[in-house]
Amino acid sequence: MPDNPILIAGGGIGGLTTALALARIGQPTILIEQRTRIDEVGAGIQLSPNASRILIDLGLGPALAKVVAEPQRLTVRSAKSGKVLGRMPLGEAMRGQYGAPYWTIHRADLQTILLDAVRGSDHIRLAFGRTVAEIEDNSASSVTIRCDSQSASESVTGKALIGADGIWSNVARLMGDMSKPEFHRHIAWRGLVARKDWPTDLTSDETGLWLGSGAHLVHYPIRRGEFINLVAVTSDPDNQPGWSRAGEPSTLQKRFSSWHPDAVRAIKAAQEWTIWSLFDRPPRSQWMDNRVVLLGDAAHPVLPFLAQGGALAIEDAHVLSAELSKDRGNPITAFAAYADLRKQRSTKIQAAARRNGDIYHMRWPLSIGRDLTMARMNLAEHYSWIYDWRYS
């Protein structure tokens, strides 16, 4: 058992990155994950410079470089006509402007790299198959929690608890926030296509964004460009929680049958789809309670219309570890500073993602104005406030 550890609930991107960031400053942690193993399938994630520079600074750059792809541009197209509505340079342009790459990666590859680094640290203990069931004591000097597994319960004490356990956060509930996420009336479909099966005349080295009526489609390369990740988001009343429900390809193909032939062929290239319902919640008013604090989606879930959910969690981990390094004896002060620093930015990005969802799915005739506006917009300037973020 590490001496005087900080407890982390949640072994996703935010929890793993937080454990690594704290290990770097010599702070022991116990990472508690309810799953018996960490396994993410069928999903890509975009690591914009505000996130990639943090992971590189943690020493993960060489491992990531072996599995990422680096799209050369973002191209926005009309789903109906195929007309290019806007472009944003990525690749070397991002590295030159922000000093860090814009990478795309399979979520499972990112999780594996983070987990391997965590397992290689003497400062981190992993506890799989356990759920934080109760905060037994949150005193002036420590916090004690009860962890339940399938076979037993145990009490664990540390000097603080970080809830990085996602949008349905159990830690937030134990802090007294009984509110529930709200269904956003959108369904996301995820598919994966091997490069050899991708239509040969469709570009494979860019991030493509197709905007349609009540739906949009995103595709980008992952795994050194050997695969193309697709995400199709549709307006839909189905609100089943979960990340891995099987989707029927013919249903999606029918939904997009009136789109431009290139978009239709991209969708038909994927033989299997998984679907999940998109949930959202207003910004939490309470991020901390004495020695307990929230991080990532547990504090500020972000809809996938800005590709910033994982990036924000990585930023959170960086800021929280930096604040804890300033006053190792008083996490309460560090938690308060972290919450103050992160609330404004996370709320702004939450709002921008929601706004993008409305813009992406505009129906005619509002879509005419959207297309004209986007054609005049400098996308690189428009999003520079996101990608140029730094904290040291």
Image: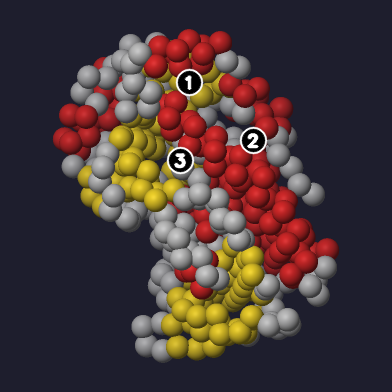
The foreground one among 186 and 197 is 186
Q: Could you tell me if the residues under marks 2 and 1 are in contact, i.e. CB atoms within 8 Å?
A: no
Label 1's element?
strand
Residue pointed to by mark 1: 75
**Res 321 visible:** no
Q: Residue at x 46, y 57 (%)?
A: 167
Q: CA distance from mark 2 to mark 1?
A: 18 Å
The foreground one among 160 and 10 is 160
Q: CA distance from mark 3 to mark 2?
A: 15 Å
The foreground one among 21 and 331 is 331
Where 134 sits versus 94, above or below? below
Label 2's element?
helix
Q: Could you tell me if the residues under marks 3 and 2 are in contact, i.e. CB atoms within 8 Å?
A: no
Label 3's element?
loop
Callout 3, which amino acid? Answer: Pro
Give the label, 2 or 1, closer to the camera: 2
Residue pointed to by mark 3: 304
Residue pointed to by mark 2: 386
